[in-house]
Image: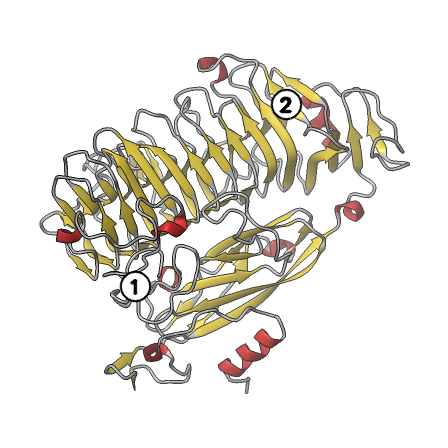
């Protein structure tokens, strides 16, 4: 017989296997894990019935076939979508999933809402990803908590990260456009060197012999034609020496520095490089220029670029940075001044599984289209990123999570298990700066199990518009700060997919979506209505709107927390009363809020006025304690 769950957890915490949860639960939820379902306790204010939810933790990785072993830097994606809990229908959405990767606990993300504070070694959510850069054996700890009962479960998994100096001891090569010698310029004595390599094809051809190709810092290569790459890894293309990152300068339209063919270029790490097309005129001359392209059609069977990692790459004044293969990770990259007009986006994928974009800036796609467009994705992550300025026509999005369809007809696949969290997203939009929905009004693209949380989304448009637009089911929108400027009318819109029936497609309404603990502020004086959430589907059901705060002090039109089409089924409570949206301040620390901390109420109607909802933390990732409050930032 095993140890009791609570004792086992205490022993694991004491031994450092997992981190103790920070939350101090209200008395009404401070229930023993052994309490039976339907137990009742008194908390001094009345008797509360608790539906205790025993949890079974289940964790897998996308590296199980490799026994979770790989060479540094090693990108691993973790999957807890198999975790279950008695009495919880949607554990991916309604349980709190926490990760400690057992890595350096001091390194922080450079972008996102908590840049310089959020630790790379920690994560939340039912799917997660981490890049292990230092060789070693890591005990990755997963803890899952029911926010309403305090029930917990945990699981540990071991990841082994190998030293590239050992793995590639015999097949590392140092490369330069000039003359280099072993034992000088940062090259070890006896190392393999290749001098006078002046083309990308010359670099990649070395992969038939060498699996770690290190390029001399300060060198640059002119790229006038795409180079195909079909060599299987594991492998690394990186940098050595000191100075500026090795640079690839694209000199013609429709050129990709690296084209990954289907069946090849798997498990490669591309790191510490620069790509650009500054020698080309803006617009059509830069159309189709990119650093990396995963070739081939969509679908989870495509192996082009599979398991590839893009780390610390600076891509600018060119078209798409990367089009991703399955199991790809982008981390700590800069993709700025995306150019090339229609069809060019900062980061793109087409019908892929397990995509992670972490701590990356895609700043200014105004001469292209979108910052990030994932056209059909299963188990996708966009976290700790900075996404600014899609094309200024207002019709595109900074972050677009689309669905799976061909010729507007559903393929049978869902875009599902996707998390967008802790991002800073700003720009102009009339149709949703962030979109989880179909690419057009006719396309049947289906979304479910989506989490949008702890983001700062600031949208600006001259005449109507929204911060967020979605057609999804069984999803959560929570703890976000929505800020509108000028004509932005909505914080969020929830509608059908497709918007219009065609091609035999039936219009599908959103089902079971929670909209909890968000805050909306708009200082605009534009004289039209202001709505926090608009449910525009007449057949929507199970839309739950609670604990939201809105303050639009200068709007002269009608203002509401929720508007919904006749026929839809929505519940709303414990939100800013509609009559107060324009006249009663939520007592932000500073109004207008200039920093994220300014959104914290200091007094007033939001404090201790929230409904009980399955939301564990707040915008800052701080555990909610005591009586629930309204808004994204707890007092």
Mark 2 = which residue?
Answer: 248
Residue density around tag 1, few if under 14, some if 14–19, many if 20 or more, within 10 Å: many
Mark 1 = which residue?
Answer: 629
Of 237 and 368, the residue lying toward us: 368
Rendered image quadrant of residue 196: top right
The picture places residue 146, in percent across and down from the top left corner, at 39, 70
Query: Residue at the spot x=38%, y=35% of the render?
Result: 398
| Quarter of the rendering occupied by the C terminus | bottom left
| Quarter of the rendering occupied by the N terminus | bottom right
Give the SS element for disc 1.
loop
318 horizontally vs 606: left or right: right
Residue at the farthest bottom position: 1
Query: Residue at the spot x=50%, y=12% of the render?
Result: 281
- The number of numbered badges drawn on the structure is 2
**How far apart are labels 1 and 2 at the CA level?**
52 Å
The picture places residue 633, in percent across and down from the top left corner, at 36, 56
Q: Is residue 443 visible?
A: no
- The disc label shown at residue 425, or none: none
Of 246 and 574, the residue lying toward us: 574
The reply to whether callout 1 and callout 2 are in contact (CB within 8 Å) is no
Rendered image quadrant of residue 572: bottom left
The picture places residue 172, in percent across and down from the top left corner, at 79, 37
């Amino acid at each position: 017989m095993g140890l009791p769950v609570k004792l086992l957890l205490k022993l694991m915490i004491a031994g450092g296997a997992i981190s103790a949860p920070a939350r101090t639960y209200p008395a009404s939820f401070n229930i023993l894990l052994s309490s039976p379902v339907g137990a009742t306790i008194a908390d001094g204010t009345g008797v509360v019935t608790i539906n205790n939810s025993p949890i079974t933790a289940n964790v897998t990785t996308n590296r199980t076939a490799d026994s979770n072993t790989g060479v540094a830097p090693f990108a691993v994606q973790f999957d807890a979508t198999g975790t279950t809990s008695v009495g919880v229908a949607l554990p991916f959405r309604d349980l709190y999933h926490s990760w400690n990767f057992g890595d350096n606990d001091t390194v922080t993300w450079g972008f996102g809402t908590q840049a310089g504070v959020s630790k790379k070694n920690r994560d939340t959510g039912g799917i997660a990803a981490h890049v292990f850069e230092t060789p070693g054996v890591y005990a990755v700890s997963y803890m899952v908590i029911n926010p309403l009962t305090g029930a917990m479960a945990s699981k540990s998994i071991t990841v082994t990260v190998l030293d590239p100096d050992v793995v590639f001891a015999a097949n590392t090569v140092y490369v330069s456009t000039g003359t280099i010698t072993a034992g000088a310029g940062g090259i070890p004595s006896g190392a393999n060197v290749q001098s006078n390599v002046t083309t990308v094809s010359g670099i990649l051809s070395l992969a038939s012999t060498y699996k770690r190709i290190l390029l001399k810092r300060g060198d640059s290569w002119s790229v006038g034609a795409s180079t195909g790459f079909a060599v299987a890894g594991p492998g690394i293309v990186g940098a050595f020496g000191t100075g500026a990152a090795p640079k690839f300068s694209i000199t013609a339209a429709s050129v990709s520095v690296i084209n990954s063919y289907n069946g090849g270029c798997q498990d490669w790490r591309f790191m510490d490089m620069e790509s650009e097309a500054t020698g080309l005129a803006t617009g059509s001359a830069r159309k189709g220029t990119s650093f990396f392209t995963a070739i081939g059609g969509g679908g989870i069977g495509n192996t082009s670029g599979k398991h590839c990692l893009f780390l610390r790459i600076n891509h600018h004044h060119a078209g798409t940075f990367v089009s991703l293969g399955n199991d790809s990770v982008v981390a700590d990259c800069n993709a700025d001044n995306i150019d090339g007009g229609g069809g060019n986006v900062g980061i793109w994928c087409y019908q892929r599984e397990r995509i992670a974009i972490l701590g990356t800036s895609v700043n200014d796609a105004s001469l292209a289209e979108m910052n990030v467009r994932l056209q059909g994705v299963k188990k996708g992550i966009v976290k700790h990123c900075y996404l600014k300025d899609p094309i200024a026509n207002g019709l595109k999005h900074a972050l677009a999570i689309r669905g799976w369809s061909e010729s507007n007809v559903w393929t049978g696949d869902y875009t599902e298990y996707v998390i967008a969290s802790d991002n800073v997203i700003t720009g102009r939009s009339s149709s949703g700066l962030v979109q989880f929905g179909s690419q057009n009004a006719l396309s049947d693209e289906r979304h479910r199990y989506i989490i949008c949380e702890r983001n700062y989304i600031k949208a600006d448009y001259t005449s109507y518009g929204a911060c967020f637009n979605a057609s999804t089911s069984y999803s959560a929108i929570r703890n976000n700060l929505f800020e509108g400027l000028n004509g932005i009318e909505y914080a969020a819109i929830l509608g059908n997919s497709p918007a219009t029936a065609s091609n035999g497609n039936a219009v599908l309404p959103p089902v079971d979506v929670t909209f909890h603990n968000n805050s909306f502020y708009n200082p605009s004086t534009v004289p039209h209505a202001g709505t926090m959430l608009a449910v525009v589907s007449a057949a929507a059901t199970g839309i739950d709107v609670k604990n939201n705060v809105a303050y639009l002090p200068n709007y002269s039109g009608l203002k509401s927390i929720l508007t919904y089409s006749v026929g839809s089924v929505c519940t709303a409570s414990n939100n800013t009363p509609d009559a107060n949206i324009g006249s009663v301040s939520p007592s932000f620390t500073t109004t207008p809020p200039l920093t994220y901390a300014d959104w914290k109420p200091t007094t007033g109607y939001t404090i201790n006025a929230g409904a009980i909802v399955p939301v564990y933390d707040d915008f800052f990732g701080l555990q909610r304690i005591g009586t629930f409050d309204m808004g994204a930032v707890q007092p």
